[in-house]
Image: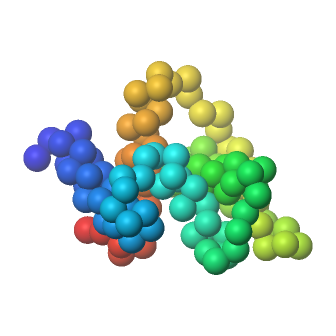
């Protein structure tokens, strides 16, 4: 199976499974799944977050998801247990579609590593 086809198939499986678990079957989009990764990485799944914290959670997720690609490196946890990352390499200029593919690939890899999907 071609890499693009495999990513598309795995993304569909992940999107359906996570949507069923967290959104009663309403299909979650890329941003919602990135947010959920941020909540997972923070380790406070039952906490209600304000709007500015939601953006911070998405930032945590993006850093964590792109860490294996060499763009970020975990640095430390602050006094409130929020993870902080340092930039190792600037992100390349990508078109919107290319950004979406990179993030989907990173998310699929993350959930495979976590044993959530195969």
**17 is higher (above) or lower (below) than 98:** below
User: On the rendered structure, is 46 left or right of 5?
Assistant: right
Q: Is residue 18 visible?
A: no
* Colouring mode (rainbow / by chain / secondary structure / one colour): rainbow
| Residue at the image position 26 percent from the left and 52 percent from the top | 12
Locate residue 51 relative to residue 106 in the image: left or right: right
20, above or below 67, in the image? below
Q: As drawn, which residue projects farthest toward the right?
A: 79
User: Which residue appears at 37% of the width and 56% of the height?
Assistant: 26
- Residue displayed at 70% across by 49% down: 55
Q: For the C terminus, give its image quadrant.
A: bottom left
Q: Residue furthest left?
A: 1
| Residue 81 spot, x, y in % from top left | 79, 73
Quarter occupied by residue 50: bottom right
Q: Out of 87 and 4, give the one closest to the viewer.
A: 4
Q: Is residue 21 left or right of residue 70?
A: left
* Residue 47, percent from left and from top: 70, 74
x%, y% of residue 82?
Answer: 77, 67
Q: Is residue 41 visible?
A: yes
Q: How many marks?
A: 0
- The part of the image, by quadrant, that contains residue 107 is bottom left
Q: Position of residue 109 (x, y in %)?
A: 38, 58
Q: Is residue 22 above or below residue 87?
A: below
């Amino acid at each position: 199976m071609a890499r693009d086809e495999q990513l598309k198939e795995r993304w569909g499986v992940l999107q359906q499974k996570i949507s069923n678990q967290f959104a009663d079957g309403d299909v979650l989009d890329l941003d919602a799944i990135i947010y959920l990764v941020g909540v997972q990485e923070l380790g406070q799944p039952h906490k209600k977050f304000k709007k500015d914290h939601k953006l911070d959670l998405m930032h945590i997720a993006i850093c964590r998801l792109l860490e294996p690609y060499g763009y970020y490196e975990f640095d430390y946890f602050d006094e409130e247990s929020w993870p902080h990352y340092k930039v190792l390499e600037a992100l390349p200029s990508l078109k919107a579609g290319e950004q979406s593919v990179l993030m989907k690939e990173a998310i699929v890899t993350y959930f495979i590593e976590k044993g959530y999907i195969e």
